[in-house]
Amino acid sequence: MKKIDDDILHKMISDGKPQREMARLFGVSDAAISKRIKRLHQAEPPESFKSLTSKEQKFVLAKLEGKSGTAAALQAYDCGSVESAKTIGSRLSGDPDISQAIHDLMHQEGIGRRYRVKRLRDVINAADLGIASKGLDMANKLTGEYAPEKIDVNGQMAAVHMLIAEIQKADREVKDCKNLTVLENPDL
């Protein structure tokens, strides 16, 4: 099969040339041109990614490499400190445009939501219980089924006050016992 020149193909597409004419030019079948055009479109980043600034795009690509928000911000932005990178990373991680770009790029690469759910199911069903428990932990975090710990400050403070009162009462009883012992037996 002859090599299809992508630059010439792009020019012909933008000029509105029919696929049959493109196929004749390159000496290939219509189906070969169709497949090549489809691959070219798949290789193009989605619109949600294109609409981001260049620094946001670098941030998204770093996140897709598995970096944390802070590490991705350090790579994409000129941060003066780790704290500023943490702030930028946190803000961008919550940005709906960034989230959409990440989602669209993952989907384009064939790792959409359904695929990830199936892979997570495979992890949970693993024979190794350590791996399965990590999968369950991951699933619970994703679905928010881990309830945040609720701290009842008033209830804890009341318990602390009761404990202090018991300690003070025991301390008084000990002092009373010592006083009684000294009165009854002056040799002590």
Image (cartoon, rainbow, N blue to C red):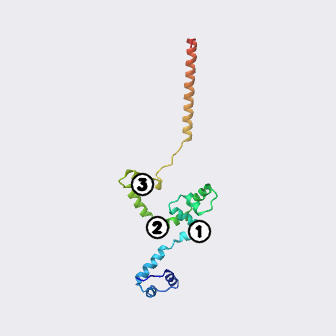
Is residue 121 toward the left or the right of residue 162 in the image?
A: left
Q: CA distance from mark 1 to mark 3?
A: 35 Å
- The residue where tag 1 is placed is 54
Q: Nearer the viewer, mark 2 or mark 1?
A: 1
**Amino acid beneath label 2:** His
Rendered image quadrant of residue 174: top right
Residue drawn at (47%, 66%) of the image: 106
Earlier sequence position, callout 1 versus callout 3: 1
Which label is found at residue 28?
Answer: none
State the image quarter where residue 169 is shown: top right
Q: Amino acid at mark 3?
A: Gly
Q: Earlier in the sequence, mark 3 or mark 2?
A: 2
Specify few, some or many for label 1: CA neighbours under 10 Å numbering under 14, 14-19, or 20 or more: few
Q: Which residue is mark 3?
A: 135
- At x 38% / y 51%, what residue is drawn? 129
From the viewer's perspective, is residue 184 above or below residue 169? above
Q: Position of residue 37 (x, y in %)?
A: 46, 79
- The residue carrying mark 2 is 107
Choose top left, top right, bottom left or bottom right for residue 33: bottom left
Question: How far across and down, in percent of the image, does residue 48 sit?
Answer: 54, 69
**Residue 93: x, y in percent?**
55, 60
Residue 94 appears anywhere in the view: no
Can residue 123 be seen here? The reply is yes
